[in-house]
Image (cartoon, rainbow, N blue to C red):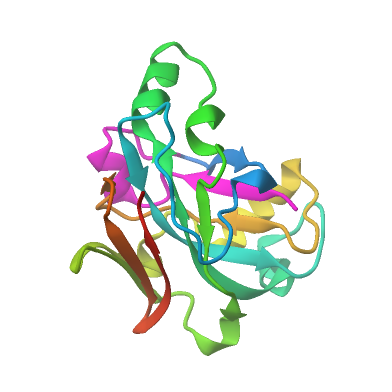
Amino acid sequence: MKIICIGRNYAEHANELGNKIPESPVIFMKPDTAVLKKNSDFYIPEFSNDVHYELEVVLKISKGGKYIQPENAGKHFEEIGLGIDFTARDLQTKLKSKGLPWELAKGFDGSAVLSDFFPKSDFDLKNLNFSLIKNKEKVQDGNTSLMIFPPEEIIAFVSQFFTLRVGDLIFTGTPKGVGKVDENDFLEAFLEEKKVFDLRIQ
């Protein structure tokens, strides 16, 4: 299983971090060991003092392929869910300042939280609301209509470089409102009005 992540896919998020809006999808990856075990707490790693939450819609590949065309990309995933791409922002900033890759800040153990997956036919993927509540306060409020690159374009682009296989996951980018987590914070993620996971920060 590959975990492929899209960076800067919402203009307001790119702006809040001072990044340019990309002309093509920004790609990074997480290893399968990044997946946080279901119903587990998230433990802030000892190497960071500034871990941020980033809530994202996640696609689950149901049909493999290479050089998939955008008009056919919708046939390659049948389910979606939500995930958090935890990011060690201080480490990422340090690595970026040196021109180095920043997988260490994105791919560490437990950095990928996943909900269950649901049939995409249950939702309007062009106008899908999702949100993150931190300590009873809404901190992220996203809608897929604001994606720079929609799911079909992402799948087509990624498949030019990586053969997609059944079970691969694609994190599609986070909206504005990312922020730091602290010990004892409580996060709740919602897909439309449905709560799909919660977790405690330790």
x%, y% of residue 159?
73, 50
Which residues are the magenta region?
1-22
Q: Residue furthest top?
A: 98
Task: Determine whether 37 is above or below 162 in the image.
Answer: below
**Corner quadrant of residue 62:** bottom right
- Compared across the picture, whether 111 is left or right of 50 comes to right
Decide: is 71 above or below 26.
below
Relative to 193, say whether 31 is above or below: above
Identify the residue at image location x=54%, y=22%.
101
Instruction: Measuring from the top left, give residue 151's x and y in whole percent.
Output: 56, 63
Specify whether residue 46 is painted magenta: no
- Residue at position x 31%, y 30% from top? 49
Q: Is residue 40 left or right of residue 167?
A: left
Residue at the far left: name it.
Answer: 137
In the image, residue 15 lies in the stretch drawn in magenta: yes
Q: Position of residue 16 (x, y in %)?
A: 23, 41
* Residue 43 picture quarter: top left
Of 88 and 49, nearer the camera is 49
Q: Nearer the viewer, residue 143 or 82?
A: 82
Q: Quadrant of residue 21?
A: top left
Q: Residue at x 47, y 31 (%)?
A: 105
User: How many numbered discs?
Assistant: 0
Of 107 and 163, nearer the camera is 107
Q: Nearer the viewer, residue 51 or 97?
A: 51
Where is residue 120? Give x, y as percent.
Answer: 58, 80
- What residue do we see at 32% from left, 68% from top? 131
Whether residue 173 is situated above or below residue 15 in the rendered picture: below
